[in-house]
Amino acid sequence: MLVLLDFLQGGLKKITEHWIDAHHGEIETKTQAKFRELTGTQKKRSKGGLSFDLPAGKKLARMFKDYQSEHFEAADFATGHSRAGRKVKEYPEWVVALMLECSKAHREGREKTIISGFVDLEGKLLEENARRAKADPGHEDIKVSQSKYRRFVGAMPSAVTLATRKGRAEMIRNMQSGIGEMVARMIGEVIQIDECQMPLHVFIEQTGLHRVVGERTMNQLRKGAENGTIGKVWILVAIDVASGEVLAFHIARSQNANDTLELIRRLVSDKTKLAREAGCRHLPPPPIRPFQIVMDTGSGLWNRHVPTAILSLDAMFRFGRTKTPTDKAFIERFFATLGSDVFKALHGHSGAGPGRQTDYDGQDMAAMTIAQVEKYLWWYFTDCLPFKTTQRKGGWGIQRKELFDRLADMYGILPPLSRREVRKAIGLRVTRTVTKMGIEAFRMPFQGDHKFRLWCQSR
């Protein structure tokens, strides 16, 4: 384009198709020279140099005409049919409102195809144009082509997120059998919970601490991880399907119902105090009242206590199939990168081994306690992960926290449960200590089990 502009400035009156065909070789030579001038490269004598394949006269003349337009967009040259230089058509507000109304079913997942909404739009436009023509004799009918309608719907953020990742054949079977497909529009509509196993020997290898603790200790940790639950840490996570935000987490030493209940308790309770004690600078997610919880059949989830607690919260639960990660695809995909992200967040880990970062202390890291690991996880889930960009459908590369806030403004959040309702449904987490006066809980010593139960029921 710059070469053709030079010809115009040199005295040429007009760039035409016939003129380009007649001077195609000269244009190509000057284009190569202009490219070398702009990139600072020299001309090579070998035949293996860079070659330019200029378009024919008709196409190049049309591209130059688009280039001279005030609405020129260079990115449009990369498309199959160039729209560079064309003014983007703008519709009145009432037409945009009709397009939003007709595309709502598709954006919310209730309609799989776009064409049904376009047919509905054509009928509504016909009626609205007739009504406006009666009121205003100078009204001109407005039409929307199918391609522009598809482009409009494709640019709109999706209002629904599928809670599973199943094939089309399986989805059709579920529809025919009446099971249906789970979708999530608002925060807390579908929450997936699961537990992630984190062996200690993998933790040490990823952080480079295997060079500090020695090979003998590493072999013992590997053997213990293979034989039982020794040397393992379990991370329980509750993730929201609509926004992809981690709503709560909990660290456990084993798989049991009490740890799962603690995860649900954190999900529906205020976590601000715990985040402040861990040194977080930002606020954690607010208390979320779940509508439906999806989980698998692990030993900490498949029991009598967890479903009873979920039903006591006036929520529904649904079990995923064994060894079928597509039933809860979002949390399984999250666990695929959780370990590596947490390892990178640990003190002293720079990807090049220990000792490469300031104030690295391998001995302290080797003796890391569960409380220290939980502190790092609080930092990751509160100060790090919400501010990472997301590539989810409808997210358009914005930060996770922005997507969470946008969905909360659009659809709202269910009113949180009161502390009394949470205690009645799930109970309290009791920390017991043995003293000279007996067992002490809630800063009150007591002996026997009967009086303590009566005191808890009165709270």
Image: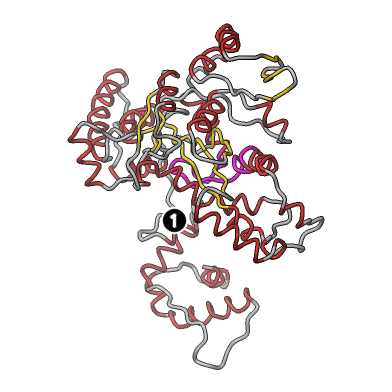
Magenta: main secondary structure: loop
- Most foreground residue, 50 or 155: 155
Q: Is residue 210 above or below residue 406?
A: below
Look at 50% across and 59% down and name the residue there: 74
Q: Which residue is mark 1?
A: 84
- Give the quadrant of residue 373: top right
Report the residue that reaches farthest toward the left. 176
* Neighbour tally class for label 1: few under 14, some 14-19, many 20 plus, Cα within 10 Å: many
Residue 179, placed above or below residue 50? above
User: In the image, residue 257 lies at what x, y percent?
Assistant: 48, 31
Residue 105 vs residue 368, the one in the foreground: 368
For the record, the magenta segment spans: 381-400
Left or right, 322 with reference to 85: left
Q: Amino acid under label 1?
A: Ala
Residue 316, position in %: x, y? Answer: 37, 24
Question: Image quadrant of residue 401?
Answer: top right
Residue at the far right in the pictured view? 359
Secondary element at image label 1: loop
Q: Is residue 371 magenta?
A: no
Front one among 334 and 430? 430
Please tell me whether residue 386 belongs to the stretch shown in magenta. Answer: yes
Compare residues 36 and 311 and report the one nearer the observer.
Answer: 311
Q: Position of residue 344 (x, y in %)?
A: 64, 54
35 horizontally vs 146: left or right: right
